[in-house]
Image: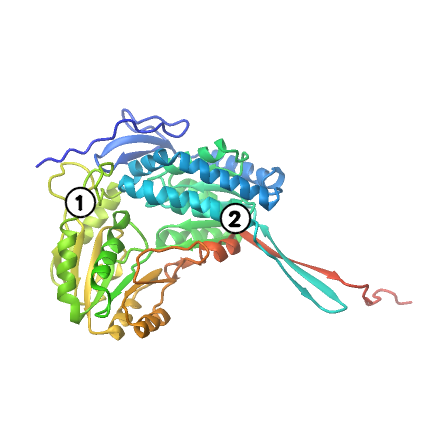
Amino acid sequence: MKIDVSLPHGTPALPGGLDWASGGPKQGHSRLIYAATEEALVDVPDASEAEVEAAVTKARDAFANGPWRKMIAADRARMLAKFEEAILAHADELATLQTLETGMPFPQIRGMHVARTAENFRFFGELTTSLAGESYEQTGRYLSIVTREPVGVGLLIAPWNAPLVLGSMKMAAAIALGNSVIVKPSEYAPLAIMRLVEILHEAGLPEGVVQVITGPGAGAGTQLVRHPGVDVVGFIGGTATGKRIMADAAGSLKKVGLELGGKSANIILESADFERAVDGALMGFLAGNGEQCLAGSRIMVEDAIADRFIDALVARVEKVRIGDPFVAGTELGPLAFKAHYDRVLSFAEQAQAGGEYKILAGAKKVDGFDRGYFFEPTVVEAADNSASLCQDEIFGPFVAVQRVRDLDDALARANDSEFGLVSYIWSNDLPSVMRARRELQAGTVWVNTPMARDLRAPFGGYKQSGIGRDGLPGSVELFTEEKTTMIPQEPLDLPKLGMGD
């Protein structure tokens, strides 16, 4: 059966200066392909070295001489509140653009991603009015005053899987604290970010405070990371790229914040609420087309309930609605772009080779689609946590299930990974939960819930999953510098140097 998936009519106007693609790719541009149909969408220009240089110069001038840094915190907070309203007013437009470039179902982006994007600006705007300094008094001697100041010019590199939410989280934090920023979206997903920045300017953001530079990371991205006029780099993406960024930034000793990959353990004990654990496990590896660094892609289920749990999980996976991301009811859209699609298929081939894996569902292209990067949600059972499907980040709707004897076995396997971004545990036994919370080597532990976030709390990873934290404390640390000012409380006797005969 052929399933018709077509480019939606009535799509919004593209960001300024862009047109829908026609003919062959333009020289010096990156061509975007709609993942559901493999049709050309738009050609986005790759920034030249001169354009990168001009952007840094403009950002530095905006920081040094523009009004943004010099605004009182309350005025910046009011501006960020305006940005929240403007984003919500353009919600359909932004969600459509991100659906076109990522393939993620439109309702997920419209209902969650755009709302969280708007919330990021409101939250960090309110933050600026409540930041407090510190002071220390040495009686009769000095008063030490500790304050925080913006770093300067930030480079924010947004990922292709959730550009609005993740790009705006760093953007909102950086500008709320008085910095100017250059945003470098992925060449696979620049449209929503480009339009978002246009909306901010339409709402009154001064020139030069936020700019967008497009193009491959190996070109404009590397030039920006190495540029001495960039003071701080915030990156969300793959671990290998994060390591290159860290090495390139070292030449000028930039501050660097990295949220990188994950291969997160999802522990399900006999004491769990069974139905809730099944629901959470599905969301944990299927939300966002499974293309999430925080996916619960290693399920570790206790032997006592393993057969029942696996049967329930597979039955639900086989009913997941796959299709056009703009059609209501679609739960899983196409993978974002061909190179990534081919990579996920290579993991499916590993599973099909047998040996250490048993395919329980999927592990192949979706039947019925004659075009598009559609991949069946996949469940494999693995006997050994050392297997590559249990160690490598696949970044798709692909989960490896392991049977574990007990919590001890689960914790040992969970921590047997080079990653440590998040972990999940499902149990109604408080001692088990508290022990897991202590022993799991991950930056976030979710208990009986998937993927909750609180912007006041730090979010980031252990080990190869990154350096630094997003959220309130980590963002303030990344995008500000601490300054100590020491003032004598009364004149102090100083040594009379150089007074000899």
Question: Can you name the residue that lies furthest to the right here?
Answer: 501
Quarter the C terminus occupies: bottom right
Residue 400: in sight, yes or no?
A: yes
Residue name at image x 19 percent, y 49 percent: 345
Q: Up-down: is 234 above or below 432?
A: above
Sequence-wise, the earlier of marks 2 and 1 is: 2
C-alpha separation, residue under disc 2 versus residue under disc 1: 40 Å
Q: Which mark is residue 232?
A: none
Q: Amino acid at mark 1?
A: Arg
Q: Position of residue 308 (x, y in %)?
A: 13, 64
Q: Amino acid at mark 2?
A: Glu
The secondary element bearing badge 1 is classed as loop
Residue designated by label 1 = 321
Q: Which mark is residue 126?
A: 2
Q: Is residue 52 left or right of residue 159?
A: right
**Closer-to-camera residue (223/355):** 355
Residue 157: in sight, yes or no?
A: no
Q: Position of residue 290 (x, y in %)?
A: 26, 50
Q: Position of residue 163 (x, y in %)?
A: 37, 43
Q: Position of residue 104 (x, y in %)?
A: 27, 42
Residue name at image x 88 percent, y 67 percent: 500
Query: CB under 8 Å between callouts 2 and 1?
Result: no
Residue name at image x 45 percent, y 35 percent: 86
Residue 328 quadrant = top left
